[in-house]
Structure formats: C-alpha cells, structure tokens
Image: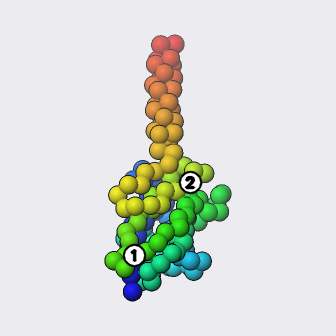
Amino acid sequence: MAGLAIDLRHPAGAFLYNVTKPKLVIDGIDHQVPDWGQYLFDVPPGPHRVEVWVPYVFPRRAGRASVDLVIAEQGVSMEYMAPSVTFAKGSLGPAGQQKSAGFKTVHAFNITAIVLVVIAVIYLRTR
C-alpha cells in the first residue's frame, strides 16, 4: 500500500481559519481530519483525485483546490495552503512549494488602511 502524505496549512495571519478545519476528499470519499496539520493516508498506487476546501459561510467551500495525480509505490507528499482571501482558490501541490493566494491583496489593503488612519490622525491634530 502506498501513501499520501498531506500538510494542510493556512496563512499565519488568517486567524479565522483556526475556528474551522479543512475538508479532504480523496477519490470522492470524505476523509476526516481533526485539524490543520500533517496527515498520512493509505492510498493504493495509481491515479487519484484529491480535493481540499474550508467550510465557510460564503462561499460554502472557501479555498477550494483539487488535483489529479498518480501515486507511485513509494507514495507522494503534498501540501495545501488556504488562501488569504476566502474568495480566492487554495493551492494544492508538491510539498513546500504552495503559496497563499490573495496575500499581496490583503497586505496592500492593510498598508492602505494604516496610511489612511495616519493621515486622518495628522489631519485631526492640525485642525
């Protein structure tokens, strides 16, 4: 029996993901995972479809990502990275190479918000 090792991750700043857990489906079968982290599943060698998402209010399946792959005798390691923005797609692929979609957008929004607050404070102090 080969194996599928998968690391289910979310961006450090996306604290809302801590109140839910990802959903994992292999070949149409739900596989319960208790939380974010690393898991190993016995999966026979051959072609498979892996899907991951995070249950959310809207969209219902946030960060949805899927991949078709062939698992060799020695198994395969994968990584899922949830997006920084719930409407973006998750990233599912080779371990250690996945990035969070929407991170730059969230970062730019945060910087813009800080700059606007600083400008407002300066404006109010000079009046």
Indicate the position of residue 94 as horizontal and vertical percent values. Answer: 40, 61
Q: Residue at x 51, y 39 (%)?
A: 105
Determine the secondary structure under disc 1: loop
Indicate the position of residue 120 as horizontal and vertical percent values. Answer: 51, 23
Indicate the position of residue 100 as horizontal and vertical percent values. Answer: 46, 51
In this rendering, the label closer to the viewer, 1 or 2: 1
Q: Nearer the viewer, residue 1 or 17?
A: 1
User: Crowding near pointer 1: few (<14 within 10 Å), some, many (20+)?
Assistant: some
Which residue in the rendered view is the most extreme toward the bottom?
1
Indicate the position of residue 26 as horizontal and vertical percent values. Answer: 53, 76
Q: Earlier in the sequence, mark 1 or mark 2?
A: 1
Q: Nearer the viewer, residue 12 or 122?
A: 12
Determine the secondary structure under disc 2: loop
Quadrant (top left, top right, bottom left, bottom right) of the N terminus: bottom left
Which color mode does the image show?
rainbow
The residue to which callout 2 is attached is: 89
Q: Residue at x 47, y 13 (%)?
A: 126
User: Crowding near pointer 2: few (<14 within 10 Å), some, many (20+)?
Assistant: many
User: Label 1 vs label 2: CA separation?
Assistant: 27 Å
Q: Quadrant of residue 81?
A: bottom left
Can residue 3 be seen here? yes
> Up-down: is 24 above or below 60?
below
Q: Quadrant of residue 35?
A: bottom left
> Up-down: is 32 above or below 95?
below
Q: Quadrant of residue 118?
A: top left
Q: Residue at x 54, y 72 (%)?
A: 49
Q: Amino acid at mark 1?
A: Ala
Total marks drawn? 2
Q: Amino acid at mark 2?
A: Lys
Left of 52 or right of it: where is 37? left
The residue to which callout 1 is attached is: 72
Can residue 21 be seen here? no
